[in-house]
Image (cartoon, grey):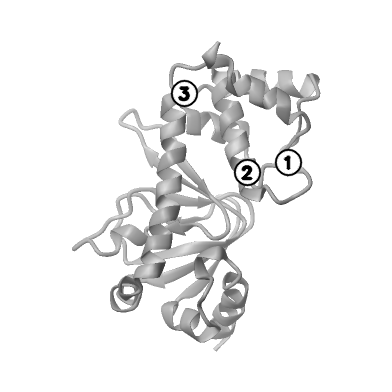
């Protein structure tokens, strides 16, 4: 009963996400039947790379990083998810899906986890939802392609591009704040760079008043300077 109440309360929040626009509360509850709200602490894992995928879901609050191991045994971060983002939805229709990434909480976060059986019985029959999820995935792929296009650019341009992409997710706010507790190591892991190099760049930007940075947040003070950094590879 408590789990059911927690899910109903979570869905009352989730129905405000653009992806669920046009749905009634009852319809959303039906689409999330037998789902559960996962309350994550920092570094808790929701899904594990290469394990059988019997669930998918979406971020309710906080943030999660999607990562996978490299052949050398390191970790590479492929995406940072924020509220309204979906994880593993498009592998649910595969015969024997496995998770292509590990999903790890970044600070206190909540995730709505839904059984694969519900996707097969309900979600795949809602083409308007599938198209919206596909649009989210396309946007994610676009961000990855942008980073790939910057492969030969200076590291400062890559860091600037990443920060601006994350800030744009909260573009309606008055302050330009990265909406997740991003560490220097996570920035480095997402860009395939060394932590030391990222620290040097971020420290320089802090000294120049371009950003304000702490363990829990990054605030862009001079976005025009960040944009200049993004364009360094064009000069």
- Work out whether residue 77 can be spotted: no
* Sequence-wise first label, 3 or 2: 3
* Sequence-wise first label, 2 or 1: 2
Q: Separation of disc 2 and disc 1 at Cα? A: 8 Å
Residue that label 3 marks: 150
Q: Separation of disc 1 and disc 3 at Cα? A: 23 Å
Residue that label 2 marks: 168
Q: Residue 226: image x %, image y %?
A: 67, 26
Disc 2 residue crowd, few under 14, some 14–19, many 20+, Cα 10 Å: some
Q: Residue 52: image x %, image y %?
A: 28, 60
- Are the residues tagged 2 and 1 within 8 Å (C-beta)? no
Disc 1 residue crowd, few under 14, some 14–19, many 20+, Cα 10 Å: many
The kind of secondary structure element at disc 1 is: strand
| Image height of 154 relative to 111, above or below | above
Residue that label 1 marks: 176
Residue at the far left in the pictured view: 95
| Image height of 26 relative to 84, above or below | below
Q: Residue at x 59, y 49 (%)?
A: 106
Left or right relative to 175: residue 95: left
Q: Residue 59: image x %, image y %?
A: 53, 61
Q: Residue at x 41, y 51 (%)?
A: 137
Left or right relative to 147: residue 159: right
The kind of secondary structure element at disc 3 is: loop
Q: Residue 56: image x %, image y %?
A: 39, 64
Q: Residue at x 61, y 70 (%)?
A: 16
State the quadrant of the C terminus.
Answer: top right
Quarter of the figure with residue 229? top right
């Amino acid at each position: 009963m408590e789990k059911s109440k927690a899910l109903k309360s979570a869905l009352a929040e989730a129905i405000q996400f653009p992806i669920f626009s046009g749905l009634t509360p009852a319809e959303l509850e039906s689409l999330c039947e037998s789902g559960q709200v996962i309350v994550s602490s920092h570094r808790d894992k929701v899904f594990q790379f290469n394990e059988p995928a019997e669930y998918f879901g979406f971020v309710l609050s906080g943030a999660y990083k999607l990562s996978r191991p490299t052949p050398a045994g390191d970790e590479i971060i492929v995406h940072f998810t924020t509220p309204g983002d979906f994880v593993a939805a498009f592998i649910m229709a595969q015969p024997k899906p496995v998770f292509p990434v590990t999903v790890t909480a970044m600070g206190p976060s909540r995730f709505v986890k839904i059984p694969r059986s519900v996707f097969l019985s309900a979600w795949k029959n809602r083409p308007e939802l599938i198209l919206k999820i596909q649009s989210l995935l396309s946007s994610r792929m676009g961000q990855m392609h942008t980073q790939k296009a910057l492969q030969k650019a200076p590291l400062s341009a890559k860091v600037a591009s990443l920060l601006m992409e994350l800030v744009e997710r909260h573009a309606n706010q008055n302050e330009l704040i990265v909406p997740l507790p991003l560490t220097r190591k996570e920035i480095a892991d997402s860009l395939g760079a060394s932590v030391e190099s990222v620290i040097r760049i971020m420290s320089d930007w802090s000294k120049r008043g371009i950003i304000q940075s702490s363990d829990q947040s990054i605030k862009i003070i001079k976005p025009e300077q960040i944009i200049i950094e993004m364009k360094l590879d064009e000069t």
